[in-house]
Amino acid sequence: MSNSTPTTDNEKKKSKGNRSPCSPSRVLHIRQIPNGVTGAEVVSLGLPFGKVTNFLMLRGKGQAFLEMASIDAAVSMVNCYTPAPPHLHNQPVYIQYSNYKELRTDNQHNQARPQAALQGVNAVQHGNLGITNALAAEGGVLPSQGSVLRIVVENVFYPVTLDMLYQIFSKFGFVLKIVMFHKNNQFQALLQYADAMNAYYAKMSLDGYSIYTGCCTLRIDFSKLTNLTVKYNNDKSRDFTRIDLPFGDGQRTVETSLSTPFGPPGFAPPLGFSQGTGPSVPPVPGALGPLTITTSAAPGHMAVPGIPGNSVLLVSNLNPEAITPYGLFILFGVYGDVHRVKIMFKKRGIALVQMADATQAQLAINYLNGQRLYGRVMHATLSKYQTIQLPREGQEDKGLTKDYSNSPLHRFKNPCSKNFQNIFPPSATLHLSNIPPSVTVDDLKNLFTSKGSTVKGFKFFQKDCKMALIQLGSVEEAVHALIELHNHDFGENQHLRVSFSKSSI
C-alpha cells in the first residue's frame, strides 16, 4: 500500500477501550468485523446517517474505514452506535472516530469491490434506483422501486394491528401512511415512507422476518403505487401526517379487538411495545444486522438506529388538567435530551416535544406511545414540524412553551454516560440513586406516599446505600412518581435521581 493509504497503528492503541476519542472526525474506524462480511454490508451501517463518501476495507484484519460526507453525520452515527453496537453476521462491531480527517485510498485491486459497493449503495441513496452493476458485483441487486411497500403477513396465528406495523417499520424512517386489508384470503398492508431509500432499507431488513416466533411472517415487495390515499384514521387505515381525518364508520376490526397490549402469552411483543416481556424473536438477516424484538433485553442495545429525520414529536390524548411542560420534559427526558416543549394553547390535550436528535425521538415513541398518563392513553408520533418556535415577545402563551436546551437535568449530554445503557420501558419498579446517607427507608416511603403512590416494596442496594429500588402499585403510578420526584431536593444540594428499572423486587 502507498503512503496515502491509512495504517491502523494509531487505531490499535485506541481499540483497547470502547470509548470514542473525543475529537470527532468524518472518518470512522470500524473493528471486529467478522470474516465473510461484504463491503456493502459495512457501507450500509453508515447509510441511515447520510452519504458515505469513501470506504476502505482491511481484509484479514477485520477492520474498515468509512468516510461520511459531513462531521454531523459521523457524530450521529457514533452517538447511535456507541451505546448499542450494530451487528454484522450476528457479531457486534465497534465504531469510533479515526485519527484521519479524510480518507485517501488508492484504487488498488483489493479495494475495487468495496469501492464498487460504495458506488452502488450511494447510487441508491441519491435517487438512482435502477439496478447498478456496481452493487451486483458485490452480490446484491437493487430493484427499481418507490416509497410504497406491499406487505403480506403469512401464518397470522396472533392478531397484527396497524400500530404494530407502525412501530416495526418506523425503525427505518418516517412512515407517512398505512392501509390494511384482506385480499385472496391473505392479511395485507400498504405502507408509504417519506423517502424511497427508507422503503428499500426496510424491505432488505424485514422481508422474511416473523413478528412472533414462528408465525406472523412478513413478505415484503414494492408496490406499483406511488402514493396512498387515506380517507379515515382508524384501525384499518391511517395518515400520520394528518390528525384531522375522521374515524369513519368502519367497525373496529376483529384483529384489533382481540389483541391485548401484552400480545399472546409467552411471545415477545413487537418492537417498542412497552408492556410484557418475552423471548427474543430470531434476528432478522439484512443490512442492519439482527433486530432483536424483545422488551426483556436491555432496550439500549437495539441494533437498529432511528433514521435521521425529524426530532419533534406530536404527543396527543393528554389530560389537559394535569399535564405541564415540565412533566413532559422529565418523562420524555428518560429517553433522550428534551430541548423544547409546547402544549397547544387552544388544545391543551396536544403537545409538541423536541428531542436532541431523531434517534432519541424514535426511542421516546417506542417506549411512551400507548403509555397511560394521568388516566389517559398517550399517543406519540413524529410531528410534521421540524422545530418548536418560542413565542414572540408579548405573544400570549401562559407558560405553555418552554425551552430546556440548557437544562442541567439532561441525562445524555455526555456521550460516554452509563445512562445510555440503562434505558428501560416504563415499569412499576423505579431505580433511585444519589440518596443522601441521612435518608432512611421510611423517609423514602413517606416521600412517595405523599405524592399519591402505593409502595409495595423497597430495598437498598447491598453494596451502596446511595441506590435503591422501590416498587409501586402500577406502571402508571411509577410514571407519575418519576415526573414528581426526579431531581427532588433533599437539601444541601442533594438531588434524587429516578429512572425506570428492569428489575422487580
Image (cartoon, grey):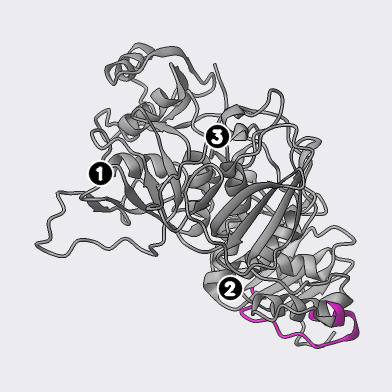
- Foreground label between 3 and 1: 1
Whether residue 187 is visible, yes or no, is: yes
Secondary structure category for the residue under label 1 = loop
| Residue 24 falls within the magenta-colored stretch | no
Q: Is residue 114 shown left or right of residue 429?
A: right
Mark closest to the chain's N terminus, 3 or 1: 3
Q: Tag 3: Cα neighbours inside 10 Å, few (<14), some, or many (≥20)? A: many
Whether residue 97 is visible, yes or no, is: no
In this picture, is 26 found above or below 233? Answer: below
Q: Residue at x 36, y 63 (%)?
A: 387
**Proximity of marks 3 and 1: CB atoms separated by less than 8 Å:** no
Q: Label for residue 25?
A: 2
- Using the numbered discs, state the Cα–Cα distance from disc 1 to disc 2 in whole angstroms: 43 Å
- Foreground label between 2 and 3: 3
Region in magenta = 94-115
Q: Label for residue 348?
A: 1
> Which residue lies most toward the front here?
249
Q: Residue at x 85, y 57 (%)?
A: 34
Badge 1 amino acid: Arg
Closer to us: 466 or 74: 74
Residue 218: image location, x then y, percent: 75, 48
Residue 400: image location, x then y, percent: 21, 49
Q: Is residue 428 shown left or right of residue 398?
A: right
